[in-house]
Amino acid sequence: MRKKVVVLTGAGISAESGLKTFRDAGGLWEGHSVYDVATPEAWHRNPVLVQQFYNDRRKSVRAAIPNEAHLALVKLEQKYDVTIITQNIDNLHERAGSSEIIHLHGIITKSQSNKRADLTYEIDGWELKMGELCELGSQLRPHVVWFGEAVPMIEYAARICQKTDIFIVIGTSLQVYPAAGLIDHVPNKALMYIVDLNDTSISKDVERILKPATEGVSELVQRLLKSGA
């Protein structure tokens, strides 16, 4: 039986594909306050601005390509049962070829009903327009979990973490909850690795790899494929 590997990825893995987050610039996301573009209140206050903001982000995601870190995680499936839990809203893990991906904060390539978050639709191209409606007649919005909204996949992700033999954290400071709390569900006997340029402080026994994702993940995957553990 193959060992279970759970990988928690954050902005650091996509940054090397050219995608930024609001944390790169003191709370600004591409020049905008997160509270102006990534909250339900912002959507109600100025839906045109929010829609355009995510259209621009979607265009950037479509132009980006998976990097060596994304591709290395696909290779890990040769010997392990791998689940990726990502905080990122891009689709780079999918495009790299990973088989099982849980998007905690939604995915920008989909839209959702403004009335029911479970009504989702693939977006054809990069633009979601005002006036495009769901089957209930409500305006479509980005399929993204905004600040102040519930994270519907968090309980499922926690259950997956409870079953893991190896837990790998890539490119995240473990500061954003509830995602950061997933580490508390990992069994104490599990091997744990953190690949990040910052020396994140956590209480569990973990091997830290203080390198960029493309370098650190590739090295770690090679080690795991050789050792089988």
Image (tube, grey):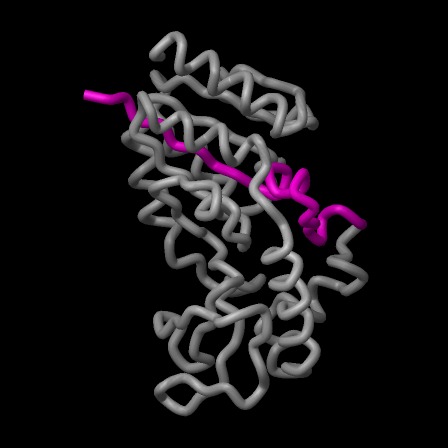
Q: Is residue 68 above or below residue 56?
A: above
Is residue 125 or residue 229 the one in the foreground?
Answer: 125
Residue 119 picture location, percent across and down: 36, 74
Numbered disc total: 0
Is residue 3 rendered magenta in the image?
yes
Q: Is residue 65 above or below residue 72?
A: below
Name the residue at 62% across, 36% down. Answer: 173
Q: Quadrant of the N terminus?
A: top left
Is residue 184 rendered magenta in the image?
no
Q: Quadrant of the C terminus?
A: top left
Name the residue at 46% across, 87% down. Answer: 133
Name the residue at 28% across, 30% down. Answer: 163
The magenta region covers 1-25
Is residue 75 or residue 186 the one in the foreground?
Answer: 75
Q: Is residue 167 above or below residue 36?
A: above
Name the residue at 46% across, 67% down. Answer: 110
Residue 226 picture location, percent across and down: 40, 9
Residue 78 picture location, percent across and down: 33, 24
